[in-house]
Image (cartoon, helix red, strand yellow):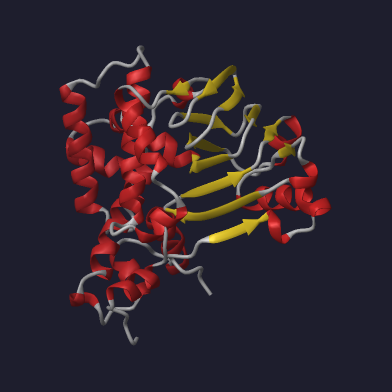
Amino acid sequence: MDTPIRQIQKWASSQIPAQERFGCFAEVMAKSFTPLKVDSCMRNEFDITVTWTDFGTNSAFRLAACEHVSARGKREIAQSEERVFHLFVNLNSRIHFTHLNKLTATPGDALFYDSRIDMRLELPEVSDVVNLKLSEIFVKQWVARPSVLLGRRIDSRFGWGKALCAFAAQLTPQAIQRSPVPRDVISDQLGALLALTAGELDTTTEPPSRPEISLCDKIRDCVAQHCVNPALVATEIAQALNISPRTLHRALAGRGETFGNLLMSSRVDVALRMLTSPSFKRLTTAEIGRRAGFTDASHFGRVFRKHVGTTPAQVRQVQGTRSDA
């Protein structure tokens, strides 16, 4: 059975015997968050509560914790199966952070780190933290050079950092659960603010030229028009626009995009419109996937969930357009 779209998961150390809390916490974090080495001078009184939920390809965690240190070194990095990025938002206390550089974040500030690089996070007092676990593909879709965000404090008082910190601080699992807008909209808003903040901090980045922007828009429109063709390839789009495939890929890369991801996203958009329309309620989800350009039902389900954060069947349930077929 699929995980319900609105489910929030929770783990509390208070439910575990004191002598087992460190080991249990590390195990839970390794499975749902990321492998960590945890230490505290309050081992006999270690207290932490974690709640989390997914939105799109990302996850939102909220930690209410006593003072402790979390770190990732060579061992923890080697245990990680995937590369992810994390955006910490410090809600109520100071945080000492080492990731390429040593720095201190004050309440309201954010920190960004790469799971493939050593990290040390010190919480010297009782803390309330929002931690957004961001997939590599999501970050690279929005931020051309994620490295510009590493090893620095994102100031909550100035520029786009102010908007990013304020928005991310609200992305608790409970807020995402209650959100009146789809989770992919939340992801897009977060991605846009990350991109704007990175662009503001990256003094080497030049804005794309108007012709390049126009070409990207033409590529997107052309893909949207032809995406239901299951055999569509980049060469055909390039030919339709009278450009070379190399120019097509270069233009998309300038936006942090790839042809494959754009094609899948366009097909998902087509499927989503059909799933939420009463006009297609008699079609099975498999048939909708086929009409959107997917040749395999299971592949359609995986791609759809990756982009939308839920399954086609769950979308149909929410919309009240489930097929009896």
- Residue that appears at 25% across and 42% down: 237
Task: Report the residue that reaches farthest toward the right.
Answer: 19
Q: Is residue 136 above or below residue 265?
A: above
- Residue that appears at 28% across and 70% down: 275
Could you tell me which quadrant the C terminus lies in? bottom left
Residue 253, visible in the rendered structure: no
Q: Is residue 300 above or below residue 325?
A: above
Q: Position of residue 100 (x, y in %)?
A: 59, 18
Task: Report the residue that reaches farthest toward the top.
Answer: 204
Q: Nearer the viewer, residue 142 or 230?
A: 142
Q: Is residue 229 left or right of residue 63?
A: left
Q: Position of residue 151 (x, y in %)?
A: 53, 20
Q: Is residue 110 left or right of residue 20?
A: left
Q: Is residue 280 left or right of residue 44?
A: left
Residue 318, visible in the rendered structure: yes
Q: Is residue 7 above or below residue 57?
A: below
- Residue that appears at 60% across and 47% down: 33
Q: Position of residue 59 (x, y in %)?
A: 49, 49
